[in-house]
Amino acid sequence: MDNKTIAIEPKDSVVTNTTNEIAPISQTLKWSYSIFMAVLIPFYWLTYGPSNFLYFCDVAILMVLAGIWLQNRLLVSMAGVGILLPQIAWVADFFATLFGFPLIGMTEYMFRDSIPLFARGLSSFHGWIPFVILYLLSRWGYDKRALLYWSICAWGLMIVCYLWMPAPGTDGLSPNTPVNINYVYGLQETKAQTFMPQTAYFWLLMVVMPLCIYWPTHRLLVWFSRTRS
């Protein structure tokens, strides 16, 4: 009896130059990632609250966890489209900051002594998750439906964060409460952008994210999967 797991997906949705079968992955990776998430999820929930899981990166790492256990390449592909380029930028900024030459300042908090080392250690997932995603996609192939599905997911998340989550400068919040989730009010956590009307900025963000981040990442992952044997 053939015990291989066969992926059931629409014709031509998967970019791979082998077959549509879900190839085995490292059990060490599977269990290490699962244990890490078993620590991160309750810590983040208790420390920052459930709204923290509205961040694109947190949604993506949950998708990867589900994708690993369900052997679902679409979930992993969606995570790749959504966060691969921003997390690569995180890696570049981290090492530049480490050597005293910060690029964009997005990893400054990783060197802040006021933040517990344990919390910063958990946040290190930003640095290695892109490589986990690329490994999984190299084994399973990339599902081209991810661009549409992640874009819809991201639009939903941005609408929720804009309408119902705290804006920068909201009074009466716990210091750990996330504000300006997914940058729907601008690029700073301390104040909203003032370059244009806030509504215009929000709708611009809804257009820019798919066109300037998700679409280029999609094309990159299509190319990446085609080059893998």
Image: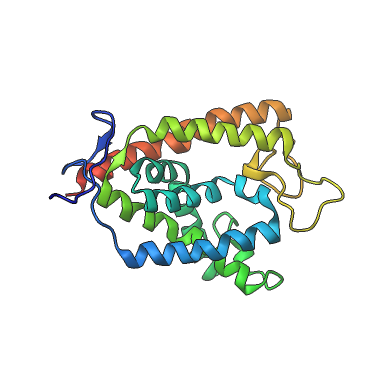
> Vertically, is 86 above or below 206?
below
- Residue nearer the viewer, 101 or 190: 190
- Give x and y (percent) for residue 77: 37, 42
Horizontal side, residue 30 vs residue 108: left or right: left
> Vertically, is 99 above or below 176?
below
Horizontal side, residue 110 vs residue 129: left or right: right
- Give x and y (percent) for residue 37: 51, 61
Horizontal side, residue 157 vs residue 196: left or right: left
- Give x and y (percent) for residue 76: 39, 46
Residue lying at 74% horizontally and 40% vertically, measured from the top left: 192
- Residue nearer the viewer, 6 or 60: 6
- Residue nearer the viewer, 176 or 20: 20
Residue lying at 48% horizontally and 53% vertically, measured from the top left: 87
- Give x and y (percent) for residue 96: 50, 64
Residue 161 location, quadrant: top right
- Residue nearer the viewer, 171 or 74: 74
